[in-house]
Amino acid sequence: QVEDISEVLNLETDESYSLMIPATDCEDMVIRAKTVFGALHAMETLSQIVQRSSEGNTFLIPNAPWNI
């Protein structure tokens, strides 16, 4: 959920975000951001949390739930 998709990046751009990952169902994961730049930061954070399973055919989010 991005509030303003037309924001231009400058020194005053709000790049804040929230990332909520539930303990059980990752389909209910929520990213909220004021701008697309905040959403980009949230996706980067998510990419650092997700891990490939030892079998290599699925992905895991350890230590869920997360609320960032």
Image (cartoon, grey):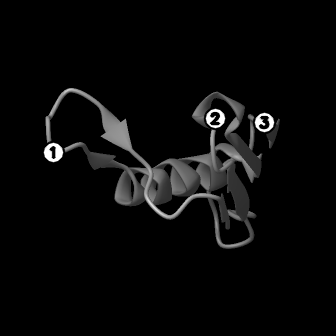
Q: Residue at x 77, y 47 (%)?
A: 32
**Mark 3 or mark 1: which comes first in sequence?**
3
- Residue 64 relative to residue 4: left or right: left
Q: Earlier in the sequence, mark 3 or mark 2?
A: 3
- Which is more N-terminal, label 2 or label 1? 2
Badge 1 amino acid: Ser
At 63% from the left edge and 28% from the top edge, which residue is drawn? 27
Q: Give coordinates of residue 46: x percent, y percent.
A: 47, 52
Query: What's under tag 3, amino acid-wise?
Result: Gln
Place residue 36 in its image quadrant. top right
- Tell me the quarter of the image containing the N terminus: top right
The residue lying toward the viewer, choosing from 50 and 55, is 55
- Residue annotated with mark 2: 25
Q: Amino acid at mark 2?
A: Asp
- Dot 2: few (<14), some (14–19), or many (≥20) neighbours within 10 Å? few
Q: Position of residue 20 (x, y in %)?
A: 71, 53
The residue that appears at 62% across and 47% down in the rendered structure is 39
Asked if disc 1 and disc 2 are in contact, CB closer than 8 Å, the reply is no
Query: Which of the two marks, 3 or 1, is nearer to us in this view?
Result: 1
Residue pointed to by mark 3: 1
CA gap, disc 3 and disc 2: 18 Å
Q: Nearer the viewer, residue 1 or 56?
A: 56
Q: Which residue is mark 1?
A: 54
Image coordinates of residue 19 in percent, x first then y, are: 67, 55
Picture quadrant where residue 30 is located:
top right
